[in-house]
Amino acid sequence: MLTTSFSTSGAHVVRLRVIDAYGLSNVAAAMINVVGPTVSLMQPFPVVRIAGNETASGVRLRLLTVQQVPAGARITVRCKGRGCPIRSERRVAASSKQGAAAVKFRRFERSLRFGITLEILVSKPGKIGKYTRFAIRRGKLPARVDMCLDPAGLKPLVCPSS
């Protein structure tokens, strides 16, 4: 028995030559489609928590944490808009006894004016990560959007259903 594997995905031609007891041969060919490895969700999947109060000029954040972060995952918080305390902060999750850490972002736990958008990206190479966006709005609670993050950790995408 002979086995082979392909290093690239896509269509590949496979040929088989068969020789019988009388020396007669025949060649059969077939096209097979090789798919790449499936990408799985980060395990455990991170949870982004935010808590605060509405103020006249925006919100006062009391809590911004990312929980259940696998060891080695990179967490980036980006702030866009006028009045951001800092533009971005990046951390790498350390391992804990449970295998999943909680990471606090205290520099964003303050008053944020309306018009500011916070983006939280949690990524790990080769895994589908977490993307959360909070838009601070005038006279309303922040608008929250939760999505998945592509395996490269760059673009938000719709989360897979399974």
Image: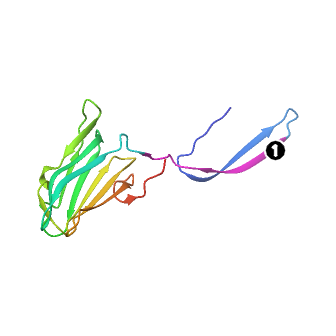
Furthest residue in direction top, as rendered: 97
Picture coordinates of residue 14, whole percent (x, y): 68, 47
Q: Tag 1, which secondary structure?
A: strand
- Say if the magenta span includes residue 33: yes
The quarter of the rendered structure image containing the N terminus is: top right
Q: Which residue is mark 1?
A: 26
- The mark tally for this picture is 1
Q: Amino acid at mark 1?
A: Asn
Q: Position of residue 117 (x, y in %)?
A: 23, 64
Q: Residue at x 28, y 31 (%)?
A: 98
Q: Is residue 89 above or below residue 2?
A: below
Residue ID at (58%, 41%): 5
Residue 94, by quadrant, is top left
Picture quadrant where residue 154 is located = bottom left
152 within the magenta span: no
The magenta segment: 25-40
- Magenta: main secondary structure: strand
138 vs 162, nearest the viewer: 138
**Residue 74 x, y percent position in the rendering:** 27, 47
Query: Which of the two residues, 13 or 35, is positioned nearer the viewer here?
Result: 35
Residue 114 in the image: x percent, y percent?
18, 68
Query: What residue appears at the point 13 percent right and 63 percent down from the top-left corner?
Result: 55
Scheme by which the image is coloured: rainbow
Q: Is residue 139 above or below residue 91?
A: below
Residue 40 lies left or right of residue 154; in this view the side is right
Q: Decide which of 125, 67 is in the foreground and name it.
A: 67
